[in-house]
Every structure is written in structure tokens, then in C-alpha cells.
Image (cartoon, helix red, strand yellow):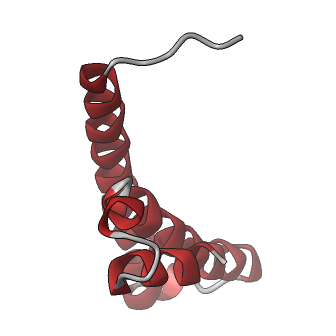
């Protein structure tokens, strides 16, 4: 059986998740901007990375929302948006 986490441990995990998601979003924006403004990166393999970055951006947004979506209630717009982005 897995150990039960304390509320403080849940908070630390949520903050860590948001921090890492924020760093990922910065990296994704770097990829998108580099691809968009540099013709040297207009190769098929870079196009694949460019399109995958958009999907990764959606998942990072979901992770950035973290537990705020479910905590707001299943019928809340935030939780619905989070579920939509995760799909």
C-alpha cells in the first residue's frame, strides 16, 4: 500500500508540477519561435518537432492547472477545459 501524503506534501508536489510545466512552456515557446522565424529550421524533422510541441503545450497547460480544476468541481469551466485539453 502506498503511503498517504500530507497536505504539505501535496502542496509541494503541485508547486513542483507547476514550476516544471512553466519551464516546459518556455522551452516550447522557444521551439515554436525558432521554427517560425528561422528558415534554417524548415526541415521535415523540425516540422515534426514543431507540431509535437503544440500537443505538448496543451499538456503543459493541463499540468499547470494541476489540482485547481478538480478542486473547482467537475462541472466548473476550469475543470471542463482541463479535461478537454487532456483529451
Is 70 placed above or below 21 here?
below
> In the image shown, does 59 or 78 lie closer to the viewer?
78
Q: Residue at x 34, y 30 (%)?
A: 10
Is 30 placed above or below 16 here?
below
> In the image shown, does 70 or 60 lie closer to the viewer?
70
Q: Is residue 78 left or right of residue 56?
A: left
Is 70 placed above or below 50 here?
above
**Dividing the image into 4 quarters, which one contains the N terminus?**
top right
Image position, residue 56 (x, y; %)? 56, 67
Image position, residue 55 (x, y; %)? 60, 76
Q: Is residue 27 left or right of residue 87?
A: left
All told, the count of numbered labels is 0
Is 50 placed above or below 20 here?
below
The residue sitting at the right extreme is 44
Image position, residue 11 (x, y; %)? 26, 32
Q: Is residue 9 left or right of residue 85?
A: left
Q: Residue at x 27, y 27 (%)?
A: 12
Q: Residue at x 40, y 68 (%)?
A: 61
Q: Quadrant of residue 87?
A: bottom right
Q: Residue at x 24, y 22 (%)?
A: 8
> In the image shown, does 60 or 79 lie closer to the viewer?
79
Image position, residue 71 (x, y; %)? 34, 59
> In the image shown, does 41 or 67 lie closer to the viewer?
67
Amino acid at each position: 500500500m502506498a503511503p498517504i501524503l500530507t497536505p504539505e506534501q501535496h502542496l509541494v508536489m503541485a508547486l513542483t508540477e507547476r514550476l516544471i510545466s512553466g519551464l516546459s512552456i518556455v522551452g516550447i515557446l522557444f521551439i515554436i519561435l525558432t521554427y517560425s522565424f528561422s528558415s534554417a529550421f524548415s526541415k521535415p524533422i523540425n516540422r515534426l518537432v514543431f507540431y509535437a510541441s503544440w500537443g505538448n503545450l496543451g499538456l503543459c497547460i493541463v499540468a499547470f492547472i494541476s489540482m485547481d480544476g478538480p478542486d473547482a468541481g467537475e462541472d466548473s469551466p476550469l475543470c471542463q477545459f482541463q479535461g478537454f485539453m487532456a483529451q
